[in-house]
Image (cartoon, rainbow, N blue to C red):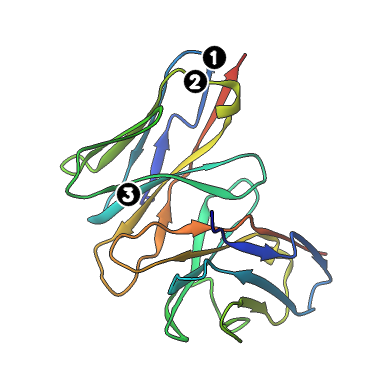
Amino acid sequence: EPEVTQTPSHQVTQMGQEVILRCVPISNHLYFYWYRQILGQKVEFLVSFYNNEISEKSEIFDDQFSVERPDGSNFTLKIRSTKLEDSAMYFCASSVGLAGETQYFGPGTRLLVL
Amino acid sequence: SQQGEEDPQALSIQEGENATMNCSYKTSINNLQWYRQNSGRGLVHLILIRSNEREKHSGRLRVTLDTSKKSSSLLITASRAADTASYFCATAGRSYNTDKLIFGTGTRLQVFP
């Protein structure tokens, strides 16, 4: 069964460093998402992406964040200058379409900023 | 106040018992989805119920949706120790330009053998 994959599974970085989190969505899906979950808290929406552009972003998704689909398979989240409060689990998700389609989540990347 | 809130926050039961988790939300929705998360792991999609549906079954799972009360419930019948996890509801709004999911706070289910 197709699934969303994410790399790396864990990332430790120093405050101020740039990190790139990678995702490979399910191949026939057209809509892509990033969410994050700070330890012990609820899952929060960051950004949605369709047709090579951002379709919606949350207040969390400030200028330090960017997303890209550099080729036909990868979908990346870049954090330009990490802060301590960026430590969280980051989930990528994809869906076939909008209007109520199931979003399938990857296993997550646990980011720790020291 | 938050869009999705589950209750109870935590639930402990014995194997073989049924587990019921509830979710309330505040805005109009297109659909409501339930996810499961094992400790520190990814989110596994369980079931999606659309706003025009009232009940849906999948194996040992039964989901109901009451849009007039803005609430949903997830019933797991004949629970097993392997069902131990956190369960989240997530709502998708009625906008057709986006489908961001708004997650609830989750219910931690512990099933004792």
> Which of disc 1 and disc 2 is earlier in sequence?
1
Mark 1 sits on what residue?
B15
Which residue bears the numbered disc 2? B79
Amino acid type of the residue tagged 2 in the rendering: Ser
Q: Distance of mark 2 from mark 1, alpha carbons? A: 5 Å
Q: Quadrant of residue B63?
A: top left
Marks 3 and 1, how far apart at CA: 27 Å
Q: Position of residue A10 (x, y in %)?
A: 77, 59
At x 42%, y 84%, the residue is A51
Give the answer, above or below, for where B7 lies relative to A27.
above
Which type of secondary structure does the marked residue at label 1 adopt? loop
Pick the residue in front: A15 or B72.
B72
Seen in the picture, residue B107 relative to A7 is either above or below; the reply is above
Mark 3 falls within which chain? B
Tag 3 residue: B32
The location of residue B61, given as percent across then percent down, is 39, 31
- In depth, the one of A65 and A8 nearer the eye is A8
Q: Tag 1: Cα neighbours inside 10 Å, few (<14), some, or many (≥20)?
A: some
- Quadrant in which the C terminus of chain B appears: top right
Residue found 55% across the figure and 68% down from its top: A25
Mark nearer the N terminus (3 vs 1): 1
Mark whose residue sits in front, 2 or 3: 2
Q: Are marks 2 and 1 in contact (CB under 8 Å)?
A: yes
Kindly report which numbered mark, 3 or 1, lies closer to the viewer in this rendering.
1
Q: Note whether A108 is above or below A41 in the view shown.
A: below
Depth order, front residue of A29/A62: A29
Q: In the structure shown, which secondary structural element does the residue marked by tag 2 occupy?
A: loop
The residue located at (52%, 47%) in the rendering is B44
Tell me if I can see residue A93 in this picture. yes
Mark 3 falls on what kind of element?
strand
Q: Amino acid at mark 3?
A: Leu
